[in-house]
Image (spheres, grey):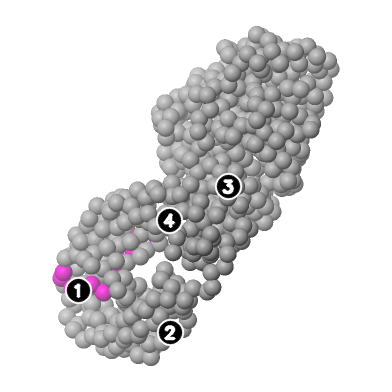
């Protein structure tokens, strides 16, 4: 994502004296060329896309599963060529075992995130100069996506990957092999995976896109052959391109549709660069070669997460000023949008280089921009349940236990846990495997699993699995009952218990804390029970068990959870956690998801966050 060619701009400036003529051309074509119909804003609102480093450059390592939840799309960067010119792309996860990397990709996807493999970067020169290289590219990229379960491909070709041969002047009908073969490769990948399932994005530098308004590499004598070289690729794939995230950084000054230079790091630059893509423009200022506008949701602003990440860092307030102009139509004094005077309400969102630098900078980019974007489009009530857990299987058993595993469910927002049910008993689980203890020897049990999300939506049940426990080992002596059962702490929604250890002729293997139809299995002599109702009486029984399945007499205690602390009036800018209560318009609401409130997120408006008590 680093561009080292800024001197190229200096070579191009002598030809910028055609501004007055071009201004008239742009005005004419802006009036005649109507944008493609805009699709609805993507589910979940405006996107934040971040690049995750598959290397160490001083920004620090972060596991995929620990990426800030404020990111919607994670671009793993980078897959790179294995040899010069051959088209074969390779990828090896950095600081990961292959199994752990796959598991983390699946984990993010279970939370509703998209994980995309990005190819290229500053060190990854990809030139598909022959059809053989094209075919090798398609084959190797397909293998990487299928191996790791990626949701799609981000094209981040930089340096000398793309260029235009002399005379290749019409972006609509390119003839340069590296351009033609890349287009064919992307269409082939999309066809293989299917448009509805395959995400295709691009992250070119301004040099390869917006500079094409002033100079086009295949049709100008004195300019760099790479100028505007992404334009034919974008044009040819516009119907399958999910979004374009031009790097609005590490850039020289660029002329906008007002025929004025715009310099990176300001709201003015971002609005001018985005407006070019949303309005369209004559390539090389040739009225007969008009690059048509992209759809609103196809355009994202590419920004560095902090000053370390790239030249042209833009402060948060300036980014929001740019978004106010682009999304709300609050025009800047320095630049007026040409494509729409009232804004682009379905604008795509933001991209950053990078997730790692965002963490290094205390998550300023993700948290502050997520709050702004959510205020533009508050989350809709979540009524969609997760998918059913698949492939439930028994992975082991004893006389008194059964081990189970299943494939993760997916959800439009995120899965928060699973419930394993057998008979009238239910056990809550956070992962995709568990061992059910305290069963009877030589007895058949039928298990099923459901998934749940933070809004309380429950999935359909998994496939049922029936398992018969092993016969008893012959040990028939039960452990002694736990003693000294007491309450360590409690709140409105939780109770923590402790007790003295039981004894057994062979050995105690664990304890079961039961309350109502639920239970928690632990190996130590304490347990915390979460998710309880405020001001409610619960009777807990604690029993010990041994390896043969013998269960001790129960120790019993009754505990009343605390009353909710006085509900305070709802206020924006406040951090709320699950179980907190607020009042609004004379009614009391209970928080359903941890969040920091924003104006527009009043409890009656956001059922995903608040439940009427």
Q: Residue furthest front?
A: 586
Residue 84, above or below 370: above
If you read the primary sequence from the N terminus, does the residue marked by circle 1 or circle 4 appear first? 1
The magenta stretch spans residue 434: yes
Q: Which residue is mark 2?
A: 487
Which badge, 2 or 3, is on the more N-terminal residue? 3
Q: Quadrant of the N terminus?
A: top right
Secondary structure of the residue carrying tag 3 is: helix
Judging depth in this view, the residue of 82 and 294 nearest the camera is 294
* Image coords of residue 583 (percent x, y): 53, 64
Residue under label 3: 374
Q: Given the current orientation, which residue lies at the most extreme bottom position?
A: 484
User: Which residue: 53% across, 59% down?
Assistant: 585
Mark 4 or 3, nearer chain start: 3
Instruction: Give the extent of the magenta segment.
Output: 431-443
| Front position among marks 1 and 4 | 4
Quadrant (top left/top right/bottom left/bottom right) for the C terminus:
bottom left
Q: Which mark is residue 455?
A: 4
For the residue labelled by badge 1, is the local secondary structure a helix, a strand or a loop? loop
Residue tagged by mark 1?
440
Q: How many angstroms separate mark 2 from mark 3 (CA)?
A: 41 Å
Residue at point 69% right, 43% down?
320
Q: Secondary structure at mark 4?
A: loop
How many angstroms separate mark 4 from mark 3 (CA)? Answer: 18 Å
């Amino acid at each position: 994502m680093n561009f080292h060619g800024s001197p190229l701009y200096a070579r191009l400036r002598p030809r910028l004296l055609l501004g007055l003529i071009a201004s008239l051309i742009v005005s004419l074509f802006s009036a005649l060329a109507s944008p493609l119909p805009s699709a609805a804003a993507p589910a979940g609102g405006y996107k934040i896309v971040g690049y995750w480093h598959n290397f160490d450059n001083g920004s620090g390592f972060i596991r995929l599963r620990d990426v800030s939840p404020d990111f919607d799309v994670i671009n793993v960067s980078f897959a790179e060529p294995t040899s010069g010119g051959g088209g074969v792309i390779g990828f090896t996860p950095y600081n990961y075992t292959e199994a752990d990397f796959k598991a983390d990709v699946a984990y993010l996807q279970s939370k509703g995130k998209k994980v995309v493999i990005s190819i290229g970067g500053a060190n990854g020169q990809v030139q598909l100069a022959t059809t053989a290289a094209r075919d090798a590219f398609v084959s190797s990229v397909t293998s990487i996506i299928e191996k790791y379960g990626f949701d799609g491909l981000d094209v981040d070709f930089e340096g000398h990957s793309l260029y235009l041969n002399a005379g290749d002047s019409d972006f609509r009908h390119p003839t340069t092999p590296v351009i033609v073969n890349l287009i064919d490769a992307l269409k082939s990948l999309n066809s293989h995976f299917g448009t509805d399932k395959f995400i295709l994005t691009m992250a070119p530098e301004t040099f390869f896109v917006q500079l094409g308004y002033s100079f086009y590499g295949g049709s100008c004598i004195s300019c760099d052959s790479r100028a505007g070289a992404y334009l034919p690729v974008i044009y040819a794939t516009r119907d399958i391109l999910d979004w374009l995230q031009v790097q609005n950084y590490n850039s020289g000054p660029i002329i906008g549709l007002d025929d004025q230079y715009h310099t990176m790091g300001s709201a003015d630059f971002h609005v001018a660069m985005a407006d070019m893509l949303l309005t369209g423009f004559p390539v090389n200022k040739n009225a007969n070669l008009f690059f048509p506008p992209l759809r609103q949701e196809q355009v994202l602003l590419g920004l560095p997460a902090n000053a370390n990440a790239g030249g042209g860092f833009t402060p948060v307030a300036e980014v929001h000023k740019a978004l106010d102009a682009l999304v709300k139509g609050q025009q800047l004094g320095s630049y007026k949008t040409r494509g729409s005077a009232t804004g682009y309400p379905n604008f795509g969102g933001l991209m950053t280089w990078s997730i790692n630098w965002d963490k290094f900078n205390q998550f300023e980019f993700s948290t502050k921009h997520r709050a702004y974007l959510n205020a533009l489009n508050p989350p809709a009530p979540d009524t969609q349940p997760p998918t059913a857990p698949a492939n439930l299987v028994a992975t082991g058993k004893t006389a008194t236990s059964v081990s189970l595993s299943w494939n993760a469910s997916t959800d439009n927002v995120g899965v928060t846990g699973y419930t394993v049910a057998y008979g009238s008993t239910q056990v809550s689980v956070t992962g995709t495997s568990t061992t059910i203890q305290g069963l009877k020897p030589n007895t058949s049990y039928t298990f099923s699993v459901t998934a749940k999300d933070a809004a309380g939506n429950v999935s359909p049940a998994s496939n049922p699995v029936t398992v018969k426990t092993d016969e008893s080992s012959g040990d028939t002596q039960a452990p002694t009952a736990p003693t000294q059962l007491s309450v360590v702490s409690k709140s409105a929604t939780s109770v923590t218990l402790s007790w003295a250890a039981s004894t057994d002729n062979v050995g105690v293997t664990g304890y079961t804390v039961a309350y109502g139809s639920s239970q928690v299995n632990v190996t130590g002599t304490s347990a915390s029970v979460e998710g309880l109702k405020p001001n409610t009486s619960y009777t807990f029984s604690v029993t010990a068990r041994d390896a043969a399945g013998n269960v001790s007499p129960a120790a019993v205690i009754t505990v009343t959870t605390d009353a909710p602390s006085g509900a305070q009036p709802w206020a924006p800018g406040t951090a709320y956690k699950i179980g907190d209560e607020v009042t609004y318009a004379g009614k009391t609401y209970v928080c359903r998801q941890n969040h920091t409130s924003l104006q527009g997120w009043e409890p009656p408006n956001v059922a995903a966050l608040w439940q009427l008590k």
